[in-house]
Image (cartoon, rainbow, N blue to C red):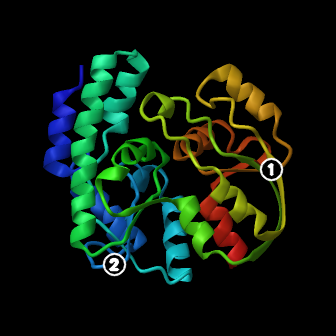
Amino acid sequence: MVDQRLVDNIRAHGIYTDTFMERRRLLEEDIGFRMGERAEYVIIPGCLQPAAMPKALRDFKELLDYFKIDYTLLPREYCCGWMPFVQPAVVSKNEADIAEAKEISRGFVLENFRQAEALGARSVVLFCAACEPNYTNCARETDLELLSCSELLDRFLDGARLDMEIDYYPGCYRFRRRITAEPVDLEPALRVLGRIEGLRVNQIQGTQCCYIPPHLEQLAGSLTSSTFVTICTGCYYNLKGKLQGKDSYEVKMLTELVLEAVR
């Protein structure tokens, strides 16, 4: 059963864990994102990312400025509900709960689309990979273009250079398949990596879930460098704790890598 208290908190504050004010302070004051302005692109950072991965978001903001992208954040972004009630429904394998969670999520996503349209946006860009399946389910209900960070970078990156070897893992997206039948487009990220001159990529196939201990062990055994790069915010957050600091290993989002390459 969907936890109605969390749904009510999202309706009241946009986020299920707290009020919107602390999240807004992190995004607007600490990182410096523009918010509530008319712009071509509306960025959806996600509800937990400002506190959980500020470095990755700060680097993304620098990339937006570097590419001179006309962007803004929503004055009140509503959580899509993945963490508080969609994922728990998927894990429980309760089809009634999944259907209810998807419908509640739809309402929050459509409200974000409405705000983006009011700001004159043409596109919505998802930084949070966990948000992506819920937004994908609603993509046909708006004229807004829906983009991932990888697709945005693919659009603006002409070329860059970085003399480095990395392990690249896109993520497994195993839970996502219970929410939407639409496949994830992984090609934009590969095109971005291919445009970085001097970069050597050990591509790891997205078949292991880093949240499953035996899979994590297999994943760790596939690593050949000292830098792990992903486009999945869930993988990033989990592997920061599991891999970072071991044998000087570091974990990065693709946006962090691209910022290093264009500097």
Q: Dot 2: within a 10 Å radius of its alpha carbon, few (fewer than 14), some, or many (20 or more) residues?
A: many
Q: Dot 1: within a 10 Å radius of its alpha carbon, few (fewer than 14), some, or many (20 or more) residues?
A: some
Q: Nearer the viewer, residue 121 or 5?
A: 121
Circle on res. 25: none
Estimate the x, y position of residue 103 in percent, counting from the top left.
Answer: 24, 35
In the rendered image, the quadrant that contains the N terminus is top left
Identify the residue shown where x is 69% and y is 31%: 207
Q: Which residue is mark 1?
A: 226
Residue 158 falls in image quadrant: bottom right
Estimate the x, y position of residue 3 in percent, counting from the top left.
Answer: 22, 26
Instruction: Check the image and report above or below for 90 versus 146.
Output: above
Mark 2 residue element:
loop
245 left or right of 52?
A: right
Residue 7 falls in image quadrant: top left
Is residue 126 visible in the rendered structure shown here? yes
Mark 1 residue element:
loop
Estimate the x, y position of residue 136 in percent, counting from the top left.
Answer: 41, 47
Identify the residue shown where x is 54% and y is 67%: 152
Q: Which residue is mark 2?
A: 39
Q: Nearer the viewer, mark 2 or mark 1?
A: 2
Indicate which disc, 2 or 1, sits on the residue closer to the N terminus.
2
